[in-house]
Amino acid sequence: MSLSTLIDAITYSSLLSIMTFGLSFVRRTTGVWNIAHAGLVTIGAYVIFTCISFFGGNPYIYLPLAFIFSAVIAVLEYMLIIETLRKRGASTTIMLISTLAFDLVMLSIINIYADYLQNTFSLPSKNFLLRKLDFMFLNMPGIFWTSLLLLITFLTALYYVLNYTKIGTALRACVSNPTLASISGINVMHTNLFSWLISGGLAGVAGGLLPLWIQGKPVLGDSLIAVMFCVSIVGGVEEIYGTVLGGFLVGFTQILGTSALSMVFGPSVILYKSLIPMVILALALLYTPYGIAKVSWRKILTIIKFGGESKRKI
Amino acid sequence: MNAGYGKFHVLFDVNLKCNRSEIVSVIGPNGSGKTTLLNSIFGLADIFSGSITFNGVRINGMLPHEISRIGISYLPQMNNVFSDLSVEENLKMAGYILNAKELKDAMDEALSIFPILKSFLSRKAGTLSGGERQMLAMAMALMRKPQLIMLDEPLAGLAPVVCQKVLGKIVELRDKLGISVILVEQNAKKALEISDRTYLIVSGRNIFSGKPDELLKSEELIELYLGLKGKA
């Protein structure tokens, strides 16, 4: 395994974790699988592309803008669609379908915007890669350092907020028992809004970083949504930090697995690399349906140590 | 009041009044609408007609988190603690609307009433026994210094010794803190022992309201609906 493959695996896993966190988080807080999360990722990429195209400079300085844009759209989605449907007694399935519809609307708008940029300003808005704008540090690309540092910083901040602040504990209370939280005087809608804001913002940031590593295009987020679902389910939706475990498992397996398989079967294997997360998802659903974060590693160690107990449920 | 959930009508012209520093029990068979009555008061059910007033203020249509801020606490029968949070965090969340000083004072007071909780403040609420959990839930209900506490079957699933303790605490709330209590209870005999007044609800309708002694005199009612014949 070469160093560049390892760097790619860490970068991809970190970006996947940041990107998917929001998907799992809003699923936990509001019970909704937000398919439009894909669109929020793409919006982040286009915010960075637009800023770079018109104002120039370093892509990283525009990340806060990507956060704000996607966060605002996520909040609007929650307020206008999810909360409205909830008040009308809609089921989570209806809400899921409504997020798909919202994603398609966003996809259309992004396509129109990309066409506008291409036709009016002759910008390569349908396919763009910003790698040449990235910096190098210790012979490694800036996207590697940024994505990893961002993930570590985010996890540390999240741990602090959830465990040592009033809003964080309230958020955990709402996840644990929304009715009781409401009875206790907590405005559950406010905490839900907070979770959608953070989730949308992080999707935007991850989307803003993606063109520094892979090609940006109007279907950028949508091309990754299946992998995001895979990460979320493999990691375990019920565990807040499960997304990171899932992100690194899927990311590493996809990058290293493809690399290893291409050495055996030739480079054509790369075309089928998106199958790897689906295989992991199938295995996860069969053996750890609640995600790897819920796996009792102690039991597994016991089974390995003593054997003969392989039928015990993990 | 007429109330229910969506198109499902549960309560029909139910009337209930609770005075200051009074324990009012609501009893009746399973599925008679007792919990729906409490849910309606707390904004968790749909009110089709009628009104609910607290201290002269109409509270129909208010959201649960708004109702909890005007001096009413509700202790639901099921899921009445945050299982994933520690006991201390549960108490803090129950006092979410209080400032730091008020929160500390309220916690000290709640822990003085339920001293048993002091020994497992850092334990997750999900690991507590039924009795301990009920004590925590009651302590949580007290955190906001309410004028009215609504308890939904606080004795359900508790051992007889623990039941007596919980009943003792309910009486303490009225006598020492001057709190009004609406007690919904399946265990009619226990509820009537400590009530000042009682309501019997059957199939979503008021069948009786008055003093517990008066209800116990009506052999027909207690035999038909409460199964207490000969035990009263």
Image (cartoon, rainbow, N blue to C red):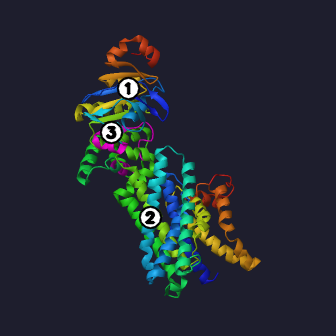
The answer to whether tags 1 and 3 share a subunit is yes
> Does the residue at mark 3 contact the one at mark 2 (Cβ under 8 Å)?
no
* Mark closest to the chain's N terminus, 1 or 3: 1
Tell me what residue is drawn at x 67 percent, y 60 percent. Answer: A283
Q: Chain of mark 3?
A: B
- Label 2, label 1: how far apart the Cα atoms are: 48 Å
The answer to whether tags 2 and 1 share a subunit is no
On the picture, is A291 further left or further right than B131?
right
Of the numbered discs in the image, which one, if any, rests on residue B73? Answer: 3
Q: Which quadrant is home to the C terminus of chain A?
A: bottom right
Q: Nearer the viewer, residue A102 or A142?
A: A102
Q: Amino acid at mark 1?
A: Val
User: Which percent across, then down, holds residue A100?
Assistant: 57, 57
SS at mark 3?
Answer: strand
Residue pointed to by mark 2 = A71
Q: Chain of mark 1?
A: B
The answer to whether tags 3 and 2 share a subunit is no
- Label 3, label 2: how far apart the Cα atoms are: 35 Å
Q: Nearer the viewer, residue B167 or A312?
A: B167
Q: How many marks?
A: 3
Within 10 Å of disc 2 (Cα), the crowding (few <14, some 14-19, many 20+) is many
SS at mark 2?
Answer: helix
Tell me what residue is drawn at x 57 percent, y 75 percent. Answer: A216
**Quadrant hosting residue B78:** top left
> Does the residue at mark 2 contact the one at mark 1 (Cβ under 8 Å)?
no
Task: Identify the magenta region.
Answer: B63-91
